[in-house]
Image: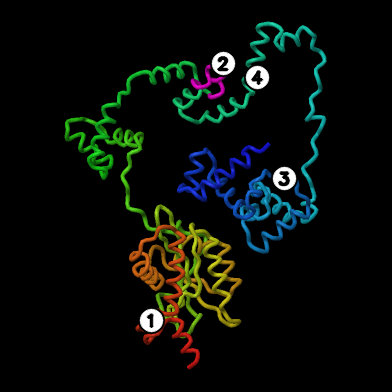
Amino acid sequence: MAKYTSRFKLKIVRQFLVGPLGGRLLARQHGLPYSMVYRWVARFRAHGPAGLAASHGCYDAAFRLRVVRRIKRDDLSYTEAATLFGVGNPSTIARWEQRYHAGGLPALRRSQAPRDHDQARRPRRTDRSPTRRRDADGGSPAGRKRAASRRAGTAPVFQRLRSLQKKSADEKAKAVQALRHAYPLQRLLEAVDLSRSTFYHRRNLWAAADPLAWLKTAIRHITDKDANYGYRRVTDHLRGEGHKINHKLVQRVMQMLGLQVLCQPKKYRSYRGPGHVDIPNVLQRNFSAPGPNQRWVTDVTEFAVGGEKCYLSPILDLYNGEIIAFELARRPTLALVKSMVKKAAKRLGAVETPLLHSDQGWQYQHASYRRLLSQKNLTQSMSAKGNCLDNAAMESFFGLIKNELFYRNRFESIDQLQAAIRRYIRYYNHDRIKRKLNGLSPVKYRTQAACA
């Protein structure tokens, strides 16, 4: 039986697609791994509600071989392959690929090793007398007590309680208190690994008066007057009123009350530390080109509308400033960048091998991205770490589109913003004139130069 029903999965997917919460917040709210939420959403988008049905894992060798070959052909990740073929667990596909590389097709045909029935099956006991069996099954008061204790220990609720063993003592005690009327107290305490004295100590604390009630009231009064106060300024305010208090206690109480200062949203940064590759800066800030499709630059920028985000990934030709290709998505994924490169490569002639310059974002350091550039005969170039001036031409375009489009208009949704960005890029390429292009738009300049 599946751990999560199809109805529950569909409910989570709809909350992700319609509601304001992201995958991590939804996973935290329902106690799920966040990767599982994204996996359900991907299956739903690929196969609809049928993709959320439980997978029984019966796959023949031909199916396994087709999956392994598709991974190699399209450079898919295990998660992408599991979504595409409806396999429940991506690690299953990883095992297939390992077995195929180790032993070829015969290794994929091999099933699980047969069980050793002599070791797996225990012999039945025949030396129990009727009296002993009756006592063990509850014939006597002591036997009935032992049988009830065994049944309680194997109940599903006890299996869930064992998952609380790493939680705090207060959470364990609350779970035990909620189930105490239905199960023996000692069995509940053993399931959560909590001593009896600790349980009664926590229960007595619940009934006692809250020693921090005065501090909570004072903090709420201060933050109601000025919501911009963090725990440091709240501490200074309390000390100014004569209270001797530590800032760590104020911080802890404010976290308990859910009081948080709203910070300015941080700018999107794709840099995640140095990768395992060393790509030189071939461009060297030479933001000009003698002809089209010789030097390209690219980057990813972020737009925020109504609590949601949109990411734009374009390629700009340094010959005339034209946007060769672009992609829009709600998350800055590797697929966003690779799809953009594939679009741009379709415009190249047989002998055109442009240079493609970027910053040190994690997408551009990925092995599959660099492999894609090699397949399309593109030369990779990277900026120095933390130096936006090395990619100034791309940053200039981002400033232009935000000043002329994003900051001057009000957008109600991400879909509305994406439609406006597509219209602007067409206007930028075909209609917006530039003085350094002799008063022509990028496309008209390229066309006129080709005819000359």
How much space separates mark 2 and mark 1, taking CA atoms?
Answer: 81 Å
Badge 2 element: loop
Horizontally, is 164 left or right of 140 in the view?
left
- Circle 3/circle 2 CB separation < 8 Å: no
Confirm whether residue 53 shows in the render: yes
Mark nearer the N terminus (2 vs 1): 2
For the N terminus, the quadrant is top right
- Give the x, y percent position of residue 361: 46, 62
- Give the x, y percent position of residue 404: 35, 70
| Count of numbered circles on the image | 4
Horizontally, is 165 left or right of 93 in the view?
left
Dot label at residue 184: 2
Residue 416 picture quarter: bottom left
The residue indicated by pointer 1 is 433
Above or below for 417 versus 285: above
Mark whose residue sits in front, 4 or 1: 1
Within-10-Å neighbours for mark 3: few <14, some 14–19, many 20+? few
Mark nearer the N terminus (2 vs 4): 4
The residue indicated by pointer 3 is 57
The residue indicated by pointer 4 is 151
Mark 4: amino acid: Arg
Mark nearer the N terminus (3 vs 4): 3
Confirm whether residue 282 shows in the render: no
How much space separates mark 2 and mark 4, taking CA atoms?
Answer: 11 Å
Which color scheme is applied? rainbow
